[in-house]
Amino acid sequence: MPIGKGPVAIYRQIIEYFYYEIGSGRIKSGDRIDSIRNLALQFKVNPNTVQKALNELERESLVVTDRTNGKFVTSDESRIRELRKTLSHEVTRGFVVRMKDLGIEVTDVTSYITEIWEDKE
């Protein structure tokens, strides 16, 4: 996920990055999170910005700190399921609003989703 310009604060963009990485399972429960310095280099931001984002993720119980070993994704699977559900609802809500704006009936939406889901391409 590119971090940069836009209306969303950079630290919030970093938080969103971790939401999606953890929610998708690309970063797994118990995985060690890279150092603040390395993340700052990766995102091309100030280390304080990364620290602010990680502090928020820790307040949200998605990241835990082991004082001697660094920061890790929570091993609380219920918290990760909760995150996935929240992300799913956000995506679905936006989709449903757009379909309603287009005047598409729910039965047609279901059919379209099934068609695309099963598309082999």
Image (cartoon, grey):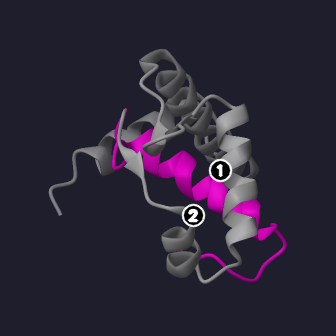
The residue range painted magenta reads 1-29
Q: Horizontally, is 74 left or right of 101 in the view?
A: left
Figure quadrant of residue 89: top right
> Which residue is denoted by mark 2 in the rendering?
36
Q: Is residue 33 above or below residue 62?
A: below
Residue 35 locus on image (x, y percent): 49, 61
SS for dot 2:
helix
Point 60% across, 83% down: residue: 44
> Which residue is denoted by mark 1 in the rendering?
54
Point 47% across, 41% down: residue: 68
Residue 84 locus on image (x, y percent): 50, 32
Point 41% across, 24% down: residue: 75
Q: Alpha-carbon neighbours of circle 2 within 10 Å: few (<14), some, or many (≥20)?
A: some
At label 1, the amino acid type is Leu
Q: Quadrant of the C terminus?
A: bottom left
Residue 4 locus on image (x, y percent): 69, 81
Q: 4 or 113: which is nearer to us?
A: 4
Tags 1 and 2 in contact by the CB under 8 Å rule?
A: yes
Point 67% across, 79% down: residue: 45
Residue 117 locus on image (x, y percent): 29, 45
At label 2, the amino acid type is Ile
Instruction: Spot the residue most to the front.
Output: 68
Q: Horizontally, is 81 left or right of 30 in the view?
A: right
Q: 4 or 86: which is nearer to us?
A: 4
